[in-house]
Image (spheres, helix red, strand yellow):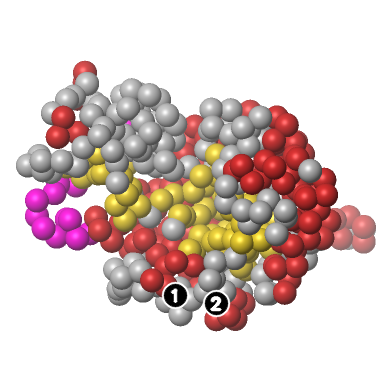
């Protein structure tokens, strides 16, 4: 015959049984949505967005006006009333993105009066237009002083947009120290989450071709520029950012490198030529594959796809993400590293007029990881 549990002990066991497991917070699948997408061909508007596939949207972007007086520059036709109405009906949060010239941020943030004016204007705009919060895309503070001043701006905005009622996030560099300086001890308590821009590891600014957004750093990368895996390690270990506050980014676009135009290769077959690198969206990649001239390849070391066209006179190497690499990034972020979420730049760039293959892949992997982790979406 077993003894009855004391009420206090029974309550404790019940509490533990009902308590969420570690990492069981609601994960995030966030999308950046550009106001300019409405002029795409085909057009992409608030009516096109599949809200059921997302948890958060960042509406990009407004910013400081060129007057540098703390006033805002809001593009014509920026506001889309249907965006927030449709998002809220689907349970999706919408943040307003604050971006613009780094010089303007430096000037405004350094002056307490201008900073307070800027913060008030940001808060007023967010509240008046029904946004759920603010995302700062300041690229990037370059010194400790600029980083400290940015923290003060975020603090001013947080005082006007209280935690629990409004979200505040920041898009941050994939490689702080190498590109960008941040006051993580000061910022982290103020922010709901970071959107780590784990893309643009290679582009027109690098002296060799390489992957735009590799999951892992290939030992064959001549510049060892980084990857989602290396960035995750830095944020968790070096900068002490809690895993649940990290959203890892992926790109719905890539770059074309003019390696065949130079006919120049490094040792070990590394593609080293680079004469400019125009952007290529995933929907454009799909069109290239349909021609039959391009061959899709997979880099096992980086977990990244790429296209080659040996007959192309120029731009014969294209780095991009496909549904497989996109799914693996989501699984890595949520199931392997137990981070808070994932996001992409930019929502419309895989839209082919009918479907969104990369977003569909993200959402499927997101749901699978949520079920595996015992979380919910």
The percent position of residue 19, horizontal first and vertical second, equals 74, 58
Location of residue 305 by image quarter: top left
Which residue corresponds to mark 1?
Answer: 45
Left or right of residue 154, residue 93 in this image: left
Q: Residue 80's mark? A: 2
> What is the crowding at mark 2: few (fewer than 14 residues within 10 Å), some, or many (at least 20)?
some
Gap between marks 1 and 2, in whole Å? 9 Å
The answer to whether residue 292 is magenta is yes
> Who comes first in sequence, dot 1 or dot 2?
1
Task: Specify start and end residues of the magenta stretch as a single range.
Answer: 286-301
Q: Is residue 193 above or below residue 4?
A: above
Cβ atoms at labels 1 and 2 below 8 Å apart:
yes
Looking at the figure, which quarter contains the C terminus?
bottom right
Residue in the picture at 92% in, 57% down: 8
Task: Report the residue that reaches farthest toward the top.
Answer: 267
Q: Is residue 100 above or below residue 267?
A: below
Name the element at disc 1: loop
């Amino acid at each position: 015959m077993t003894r009855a549990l004391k009420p206090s002990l029974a309550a404790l066991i019940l509490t533990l049984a009902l308590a969420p497991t570690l990492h069981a917070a609601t994960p995030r699948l966030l999308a950046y949505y550009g106001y300019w997408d409405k002029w795409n061909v085909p057009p992409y508007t608030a009516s096109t967005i599949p809200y059921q596939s997302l948890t958060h949207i960042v509406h990009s972007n407004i910013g400081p006006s060129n007057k540098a007086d703390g006033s805002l520059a809001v593009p014509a036709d920026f506001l889309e009333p249907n965006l927030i109405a449709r998002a809220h009906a689907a349970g999706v949060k919408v943040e307003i993105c604050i971006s613009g010239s780094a010089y303007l941020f430096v000037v405004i943030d350094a002056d307490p009066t201008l900073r307070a004016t800027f913060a008030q204007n940001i808060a007023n705009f967010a509240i008046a237009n029904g946004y759920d919060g603010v995302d700062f895309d300041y690229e990037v503070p370059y010194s400790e002083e600029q980083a400290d001043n940015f923290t003060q701006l975020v603090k001013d905005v947080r005082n006007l947009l209280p935690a629990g009622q409004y979200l505040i996030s920041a898009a941050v560099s994939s490689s702080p120290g190498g590109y960008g300086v941040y006051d993580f001890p000061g910022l982290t308590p103020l922010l709901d989450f970071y959107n780590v821009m784990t893309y643009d590891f290679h582009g027109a600014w690098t002296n060799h071709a390489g992957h735009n957004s590799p999951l892992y750093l290939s030992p064959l990368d001549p510049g060892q520029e980084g990857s989602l895996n290396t960035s995750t390690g830095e944020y968790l270990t070096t900068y002490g950012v809690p895993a649940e506050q990290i959203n890892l980014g992926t790109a719905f676009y890539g770059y074309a490198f003019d390696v065949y135009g130079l006919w120049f290769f490094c040792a070990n077959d590394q593609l080293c030529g680079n004469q400019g690198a125009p952007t290529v969206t995933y929907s454009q990649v799909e069109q290239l594959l349909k021609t039959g001239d391009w061959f899709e390849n997979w880099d096992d070391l980086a977990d990244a796809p790429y296209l080659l066209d040996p007959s192309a006179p120029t731009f014969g190497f294209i780095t991009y993400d496909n549904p497989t690499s996109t799914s693996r990034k989501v699984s890595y972020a949520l199931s392997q590293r137990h981070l808070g979420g994932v996001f992409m730049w930019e929502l419309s760039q895989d839209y082919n007029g009918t479907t969104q293959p990369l977003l569909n892949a993200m959402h499927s992997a997101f749901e699978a990881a949520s079920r595996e982790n015992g979380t919910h979406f």
